[in-house]
Image (spheres, grey):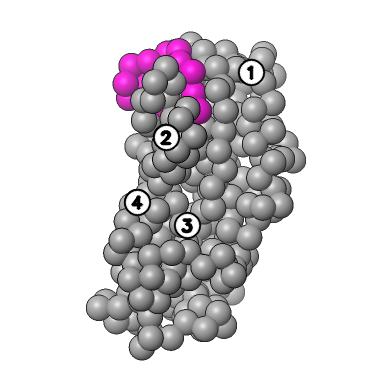
Amino acid sequence: MIESSSMLIIGIDHGYGNIKTANCVFPTGLLKSDTVPAFTHDLLVWEGKYYTIGVGHKEFTPEKMKDEDFYVLTLAAIASEFRLVQRTEATVYLAVGLPLTWVSGQKAAFKEYLLQREGAEFYYRGVNYRVRFAGAEIFPQGFAAVADRLRDFGGVNMLCDIGNGTMNVMYITDHKPDMRRMFTEKYGTHQCVLQVRENVMREHHAAIDDSVIDRVLRTGTADIDGAYLETITATAKAYAEGIFRKLREHEYDPKLMNLYVVGGGGCLVKNFADYDPRRVFIDEDVCAAAQGYEYMAEVVMRRSGA
């Protein structure tokens, strides 16, 4: 969160696995009800409806505007940032992103979706909040995570942003993004999770909780039977090989360029892929994109004299 003049710039990375702000992370899921649920720790109340935040998993959809879910999750993200600075009311300028090749086609609709109301009053985790929206800026995912350090990208570089739903690839040449070489693949980490579930069921006839899969993917291990761990590890290695196969389809050559991996899926490359650490750099900060959105929004506002 950046305080600018009379407003707060809040960056939000609307991932399919997690919602990330510059300082907070929570699962992209919610459970809506017409009555107060039994457990209220993560309860958000807005316009007479009750939403338990962080429950379930948001289904992948190429259009995030098709229902109210991402709007409600945006309110929860704003409140999470407010809570850190003990604010309950403020004017907010949203800085968000979309996959690289979706920005031009969906930017206007996503902005309209986020600014559908002038403001909102809601209750979250025991506190009442009031927010007024001053505007919103939509940026390309992945690139935002490195926008403040383009000086490090001399020569030819490939940037790979691995999220839960998509994998975004772009070239940065001599410190500048190459707008002609940007790609979005539906090859996010959720594809790996689905394959792990299938392989564990086929080989061990057992259903495995996603929290166990997530722990293995993030850390490389978990406190489970060795045979199950071997199955998950083998599946993750195959997925990591698939990442580099996708990159080679977009002309990745480790001898001619550096590779920068950002996003939550970077842990799979780190834990399960074979790569040269002198030419492959992994940013494990899952909040980097949200921080980048704030940086880019501040630059835009400064240039416009806002």
Q: Which residue is mark 3?
A: 142
Q: Secondary structure at mark 1?
A: loop
Left or right: where does residue 284 sit relative to residue 197? left
Residue beneath the point at 56% across and 22% down:
133
Q: Which residue is mark 4?
A: 148
Left or right: where does residue 233 sit relative to residue 119? left
| Amino acid at the residue labelled 4 | Asp
Say how many tags the image has: 4
Q: Which residue is mark 2?
A: 302
Q: Earlier in the sequence, mark 3 or mark 1?
A: 1
Which numbered dot is residue 67?
none
Q: CA distance from mark 4 to mark 2?
A: 15 Å
Q: Position of residue 182 (x, y in %)?
A: 57, 67
Q: Position of residue 241 (x, y in %)?
A: 47, 80
| Amino acid at the residue labelled 3 | Gly
Magenta-tinted stretch: 81-93
- Observer-side mark, 2 or 3, equals 2
In this view of the protein, can residue 157 be seen by the observer? no
Q: Which residue is mark 1?
A: 118
Q: Earlier in the sequence, mark 4 or mark 1?
A: 1
Q: Earlier in the sequence, mark 2 or mark 3?
A: 3
Q: Earlier in the sequence, mark 4 or mark 2?
A: 4
Location of residue 258 (image quadrant): bottom left
Q: CA distance from mark 3 to mark 4?
A: 12 Å
| Amino acid at the residue labelled 1 | Glu
Residue beneath the point at 36% across and 25% down:
3
* Tag 2 near tag 3, CB within 8 Å: no
Q: Secondary structure at mark 3?
A: loop
Q: Is residue 166 above or below residue 19?
A: below
